[in-house]
């Protein structure tokens, strides 16, 4: 495998509500939010994401969510695919194993942010990472907290550890 080169890194951003958050948020939480975000990192020709089944990957844009709503270019990385996969395997056995998933506090966006910093030194957009605290600061968010605490999201794909 070629160990040198520069590889493009992107974050794919999906609105899991397909526009409903934009329409309903002023009434429900008393402030406008543009979406409820799922993110994934795209590098080395694959899309990598975290959910209730751990770290998974698929062809870019091929999750059950369809094509991304937004794509943000994070720059390039010098990290070769083999080293990156070793890094992800380590994360999948520790910080980002499926049992560590939490919809609000340790989710796909936490994963994408950490991986983006590993690859490029850059973070994903703050409007994504700040959304849970923004929503939970509202009375409606507080009322939803017990329900949201019990939710797990699994967008499909291939588990990096070879598990379904």
Image (tube, grey):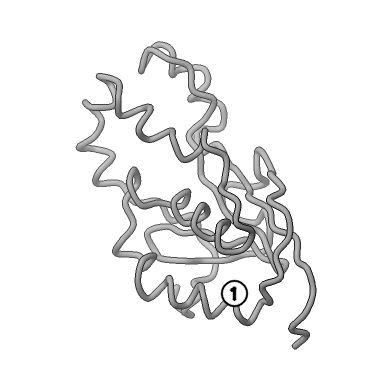
Q: Is residue 91 left or right of residue 99?
A: right
- Identified at 52% across, 30% down, the residue is 35
Q: Is residue 52 left or right of residue 125?
A: left
> Considering only vertical position in the picture, is 155 above or below 131?
below
Q: Give the camera-side residue of 147 and 84.
A: 84
Q: Residues within 10 Å of mark 1 (few under 14, many from 20)?
A: some
Quadrant of the snapshot with the N terminus: bottom right
**Residue bearing mark 1:** 84
Quadrant of the snapshot with the C terminus: bottom left
Residue 163: x and y in percent read 44, 77
> Considering only vertical position in the picture, is 89 above or below 41?
below
Residue 134: x and y in percent read 38, 27
- Identified at 56% across, 32% down, the residue is 18
- Residue at the bottom extreme, as displayed: 1
Residue 147: x and y in percent read 24, 38
Q: Give the camera-side residue of 8 and 39.
A: 8
- Identified at 49% across, 57% down, the residue is 114
Helix, strand or loop at label 1? It is helix
């Amino acid at each position: 495998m070629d160990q040198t080169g520069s590889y493009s890194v992107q974050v794919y951003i999906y609105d899991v509500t397909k526009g409903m958050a934009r329409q309903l948020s002023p009434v429900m939480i008393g402030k406008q939010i543009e979406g409820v975000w799922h993110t994934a990192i795209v590098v080395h020709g694959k899309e990598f994401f975290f959910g209730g089944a751990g770290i998974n990957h698929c062809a870019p844009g091929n999750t059950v969510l369809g094509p991304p709503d937004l794509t943000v270019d994070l720059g390039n990385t010098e990290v070769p695919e083999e080293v990156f996969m070793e890094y992800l395997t380590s994360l999948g056995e520790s910080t980002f194993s499926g049992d560590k998933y939490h919809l609000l506090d340790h989710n796909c966006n936490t994963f994408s942010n950490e991986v983006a910093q590993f690859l490029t030194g850059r973070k994903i957009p703050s409007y994504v990472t700040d959304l849970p605290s923004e929503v939970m600061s509202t009375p409606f968010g507080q009322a939803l907290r017990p329900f949201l605490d019990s939710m797990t999201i699994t967008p499909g794909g291939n588990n990096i550890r070879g598990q379904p």
